[in-house]
Structures are given as structure tokens and as C-alpha cells.
């Protein structure tokens, strides 16, 4: 059950939040003095104030990917010292193997005095929690309303470059280990006439694997790897003979096993915390509310000034020094 959730709309292409509202479950003992509401061009923003303290509150954050544009709101909030101004000491946990984010959050929460927040796609969060209810985690917010997950491939003069020369074989899709089952279900690869084979491949070298022909398609984000592929091909255009990036979004993809008329992946980069940190009328819950408020204020800044947001991401990447596995995404 969602206890706290920021709702927001998105831009069609950039998939960034434009409007948000904090939903608080009925029964909370908040009076009107504890609610602050402001209006601006982005819409209505409602959030609960937290109690100020003399010492900073520690928030440990586990990202499910490299610090990049999909976390631009966090980067902008850091660059403008918004967390610090709200009494939050934000520390980042090391990048972890694919699919281990929820377990890492639980481990950290068990061994720290502060609160712990993680990020992961909803299509990963829900099945993982179903398999491991002992994790006792709850989603509380989302940075993207619609998933930017897609399959990226190379196209020559508008035609797919896979299986050139008439060779009949299955197309190989390189995907993250935790997303292989999802793509298999979406593409019905278990059927005898399926033309796809989905394999687990390194996330750090996915662009290079596609460009070198090691795979025919890759799991990608329209906000990240696709942009890099387009830039690389533009720089190499004279020798690539009009090769471009083909993008097939997974959200809404036609799936004959889905009677609703298309795939629905839900929110992306869901922010989640432990059940105990979200207990009502607790100090930890108030800290989490402040963290969410600051994070989405950072997203407001990113929306209004995209070039500055990109620079902020680059600066925070350097400042944090997190292991980026020498990836080929930038």
C-alpha cells in the first residue's frame, strides 16, 4: 500500500515531472498549520512541513543506476544545497549489482541510525517484493510517471539493419539481468515462432555492443543511452551511410497476451523506503517527506533550465565519484 506518493505529469519526450502533490492517507493528525501550499506555472504543490532540529538528519540513498539525467532532480537539489538547507545530510550508497537495490536498502536500514531511500523501476519493485515480502519495503514516490524503457536498434535509411543479407536467425536482445524476464514476457519469446532471444548483458557496455553488432537490440532509456547513440551516429554520419537509432518503447507495446491493449510498466525510478521509516507520526517519516519535497524542488529547477541541469549532473557525477563501471553512456 502506498503511504506517501508524489503525483506529477510528464513532458511527452523528456519524461520529467511537471506537477506533483503529496498524498497523505486519511487518519493523519495534521491540522491546517502543518500544510504549506504554493502555486506556480508548474501547478499545485502541497507538502507537509517537518520539524526542524539542530542536528542534520542522515539519509542514505541507493540509486539503481549511474548518476545521470534520470536523477537530474537530485543533482540540481544537491548543486543548490537544498538538502543541506532542510537539515538533511545526504549520502550515497555504492552502486550495486543489477537487481540488488531493494536488498541493499534493507541491509543498510538494518545497520544505520538514519533513514534509507532506494530507487528502482516499478516493474522491478513489485515482483521483487512479492518474492521477498520479508524486505518490508514500501514505495512512496516516483520521478517518472511513464517508463522510458525501450528497445534500441540501428536503422539504415529507415530499415532495420538486423539480419542483413537475408540471414534467418533470432534477433539477440541485450538486457539487464533483472529485466530479462520482463522482456521475455512482453515479446512472448517462449513461443516457437518468436524471432527474439533475450540475453543478460553488461549494462556498462550496451551501446558499444550494439554499435559493434554483438547484439541486435539493447534495453535502453530514451533519456540516457538513446541520446548518446544518436550523438555518436551524428558524429560518424559520413561513414555510417544514414544509419540512425530506432526506438521501440516498451510502454504501450502491443502484446497479444495482454487484453488491455498494450504493455503497462507503471512508474519509473520509484523511490521507496522501509515500512518502519514510514510509520505515521514518526520523526523518520517527517525526514522522508522533507527529502521528497527537496528532490522535487530540484526537478522543478531541472525542468526550467535543462542546460544547467545537464551541467549539474556532470558536476555531481564528478563530486560523488561513484563507480560508473567505465560505462559508454555519456
Image (tube, rainbow, N blue to C red):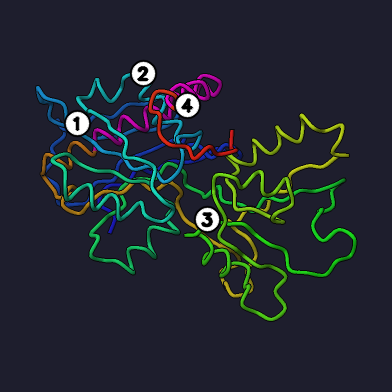
In magenta stretch: residue 228 = no
**Residue to which mark 4 is pinned:** 313
Q: In the rendered structure, find residue 132 and report the number of the disc placed on it.
A: none
Measure how far apart labels 1 and 4 are at the Cα level: 27 Å
Q: Please tell me in which quadrant of the rendered image residue 137 appears.
A: bottom left
Q: In the rendered structure, find residue 176 and report the number of the disc placed on it.
A: 3
Pointer 3 with pointer 1, Cβ within 8 A: no
**Residue to which mark 1 is pinned:** 49
Lower sequence index among marks 2 and 3: 2
In this rendering, which labeled residue sits more in front, label 2 or label 1? 2
- Residue 102 position, x and y percent, is 32, 54
- Residue 186 position, x and y percent, is 59, 67
Lower sequence index among marks 4 and 2: 2
- Crowding near the residue tagged with mark 4, few <14, some 14–19, many ≥20 C-alpha atoms within 10 Å: many
Pointer 2 with pointer 1, Cβ within 8 A: no
In this rendering, which labeled residue sits more in front, label 3 or label 4? 3
Q: In the rendered structure, find residue 80 and report the number of the disc placed on it.
A: 2
- Crowding near the residue tagged with mark 1, few <14, some 14–19, many ≥20 C-alpha atoms within 10 Å: some
Pointer 3 with pointer 4, Cβ within 8 A: no
- Residue 228 position, x and y percent, is 65, 35
Image-based side of 60 in relation to 241, left or right: left
Highlighted range, magenta: 289-316
Amino acid at each position: 500500500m502506498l503511504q506517501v506518493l508524489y503525483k506529477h505529469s510528464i513532458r511527452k519526450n523528456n519524461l520529467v515531472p511537471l506537477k506533483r502533490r503529496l498524498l497523505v492517507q486519511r487518519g493523519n493528525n495534521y491540522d491546517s498549520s502543518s500544510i504549506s501550499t504554493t502555486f506556480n506555472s508548474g501547478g499545485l504543490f502541497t507538502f507537509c512541513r517537518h520539524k526542524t532540529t539542530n542536528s542534520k538528519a542522515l539519509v542514505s540513498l541507493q540509486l539503481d543506476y549511474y548518476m545521470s539525467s534520470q536523477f537530474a532532480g537530485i543533482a540540481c537539489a544537491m548543486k543548490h544545497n537544498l538538502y543541506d538547507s532542510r537539515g538533511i545530510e545526504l549520502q550515497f550508497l555504492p552502486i550495486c549489482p543489477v537487481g540488488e537495490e531493494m536488498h541493499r536498502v534493507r541491509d543498510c536500514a538494518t545497520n544505520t541510525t538514519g533513514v534509507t531511500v532506494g530507487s528502482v523501476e516499478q516493474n522491478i519493485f513489485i515482483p521483487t517484493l512479492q518474492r521477498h515480502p520479508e524486505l518490508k519495503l514500501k514505495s512512496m514516490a516516483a520521478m517518472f510517471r511513464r517508463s522510458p524503457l525501450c528497445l534500441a536498434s540501428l536503422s539504415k535509411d529507415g530499415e532495420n539493419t538486423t539480419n542483413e543479407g537475408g540471414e534467418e536467425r533470432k534477433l539477440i536482445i541485450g538486457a539487464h539481468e533483472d529485466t530479462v524476464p520482463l522482456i521475455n514476457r512482453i515479446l512472448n519469446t517462449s513461443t516457437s515462432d518468436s524471432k527474439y532471444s533475450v540475453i543478460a548483458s553488461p549494462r556498462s557496455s550496451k551501446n558499444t555492443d550494439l554499435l559493434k553488432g554483438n547484439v541486435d537490440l539493447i534495453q535502453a532509456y530514451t533519456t540516457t543511452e538513446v541520446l548518446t547513440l544518436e550523438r555518436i551516429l551524428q558524429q560518424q554520419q559520413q561513414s555510417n551511410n544514414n544509419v540512425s537509432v530506432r526506438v521501440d518503447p516498451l510502454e504501450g507495446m502491443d502484446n497479444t497476451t495482454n487484453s488491455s491493449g498494450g504493455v503497462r510498466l507503471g512508474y519509473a525510478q520509484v523511490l521507496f523506503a522501509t515500512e518502519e521509516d514510514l510509520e505515521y507520526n514518526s520523526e523518520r517519516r517527517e525526514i522522508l517527506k522533507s527529502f521528497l519535497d527537496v528532490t522535487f524542488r530540484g526537478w522543478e529547477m531541472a525542468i526550467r533550465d535543462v542546460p544547467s541541469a545537464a551541467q549539474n549532473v556532470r558536476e555531481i557525477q564528478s563530486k560523488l565519484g561513484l563507480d560508473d563501471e567505465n560505462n559508454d553512456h555519456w
